[in-house]
Image (cartoon, rainbow, N blue to C red):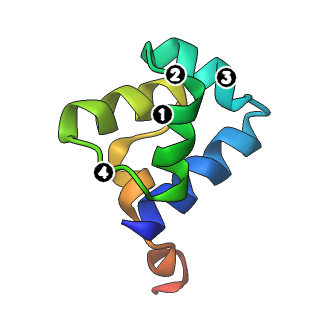
Amino acid sequence: MARLALNIRRQREHLNYSQEYVAGRLNISQSGYSKIEQGASSINVERLYQIAEVLEITPKELLEDGKQENAA
């Protein structure tokens, strides 16, 4: 779960989106969204897809640990 939270935060920052902007797109509070990024709140599959859409990335990419990039 910590990897997912980290990937969500990194992608949001990569896009220069504020937590408030993403939370608004998800129709949740900024504090609720912050808990997702902190890994303090679990998310279901539907929410994962919503977050991925807002962050312009696939759910699979959000779940990856980055180790596949170095595999040959």
Task: Report how far apart the C-alphas of labels 3 and 2 lie in the structure.
Answer: 8 Å
Which sits in the foreground, 12 or 1?
Answer: 1
Q: Which amino acid type is shown beneath numbered disc 4?
A: Ser
Tell me the residue that label 3 is attached to: 20
Tell me the residue that label 2 is attached to: 29
Which sits in the foreground, 38 or 5?
Answer: 38
Q: Are marks 1 and 4 in contact (CB under 8 Å)?
A: no
The picture places residue 62, in percent across and down from the top left corner, at 43, 52
Q: Which amino acid type is shown beneath numbered disc 1?
A: Gly
Q: Residue at x 32, y 39 (%)?
A: 48
Task: Report how far apart the C-alphas of labels 1 and 3 lie in the structure.
Answer: 10 Å
31 horizontally vs 48: left or right: right
Task: Report how far apart the C-alphas of labels 1 and 4 lie in the structure.
Answer: 11 Å
Q: Secondary structure at mark 4?
A: loop
54 horizontally vs 12: left or right: left
First in residue order: circle 1 vs circle 3: 3
63 horizontally vs 25: left or right: left
Task: Report how far apart the C-alphas of labels 2 and 4 lie in the structure.
Answer: 15 Å
Q: Are marks 2 and 1 in contact (CB under 8 Å)?
A: yes
Q: Secondary structure at mark 2?
A: loop
